[in-house]
Image (tube, rainbow, N blue to C red):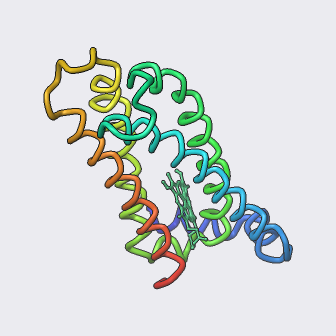
Amino acid sequence: MTQSFFEWMQGLSFSAWMLEETWASPIIQCMHLVALVAFAGAVLVVDMRLLGRGLIKTSTARLARELDRWMIWSFVALFVTGAPQVLSTALKQYYSPFFWWKMQIIVIGLVFTFTIRRRVAFAEEGTLGHWPKVVGVLSIGIWTSVSVWARLIGLLS
Ligand code: HEM
């Protein structure tokens, strides 16, 4: 069932177009990386603040509020630029364990970011003991591992 879905994606004329057009894949890949820079920036500024580093003159809640839109829209951009890459290399992705690791950790990362991290970032400062630091480290770890798995798709598949 999953395999036939990936075979169907690979067979789309859009996928053939992406592979035939010299500049299509490189441009989409560059856009994916630009989106990644925006996403990583928006996430890291708040994570560093949770660790008591970086923009310490501004409250964590305010930084989290201000960067929320950047984080959400840059993730949307990651999805929009990631999806065509999945379509055009569907079978490669299907057979790569790193692709499946990446997707599972993205889901974990999204759930974590919009539940626990959000609560901790918006909480009144100094009321949660060491939890902000734990959450900051976990968040950095989760999104770094997504990037590592993603890179390994290209290197080892
Ligand atoms: C649901 C959203 C996403 C989709 C569908 C997606 C899909 C992809 C695909 C298909 C590739 C190409 C892999 C290959 O064949 O070499 C890729 C590359 C990559 N992605 Fe994503 N991605 C998504 C979100 C993310 C996120 C959230 C991150 C990081 C936090 C990320 C980081 C990367 C990196 C670092 C690369 C490697 C770029 C390179 O080697 O040039 N992606 N992505």
| x and y, in percent, of residue 135 in the image | 25, 39
Residue ID at (20%, 41%): 134
For this view, does 145 lie left or right of residue 41? left
Instruction: Decide: is 7 above or below 121.
Output: below
Q: Quadrant of residue 34?
A: bottom right
Rendered-image quadrant of the N terminus: bottom left
Residue ID at (39%, 20%): 61
Instruction: Decide: is 56 above or below 153.
Output: above
Instruction: Decide: is 8 above or below 40.
Output: below
For this view, does 152 lie left or right of residue 108? right
| x and y, in percent, of residue 109 in the image | 36, 45
Q: Nearer the viewer, residue 57 or 6?
A: 57
| x and y, in percent, of residue 94 in the image | 48, 71
Q: Nearer the viewer, residue 14 or 157?
A: 157
Q: Nearer the viewer, residue 139 or 58?
A: 58
Residue ID at (54%, 45%): 41
| x and y, in percent, of residue 89 in the image | 62, 72
Residue ID at (31%, 36%): 52
Furthest residue in direction bottom, as rendered? 156
Total marks shown come to 0
Furthest residue in direction front, as rendered? 57
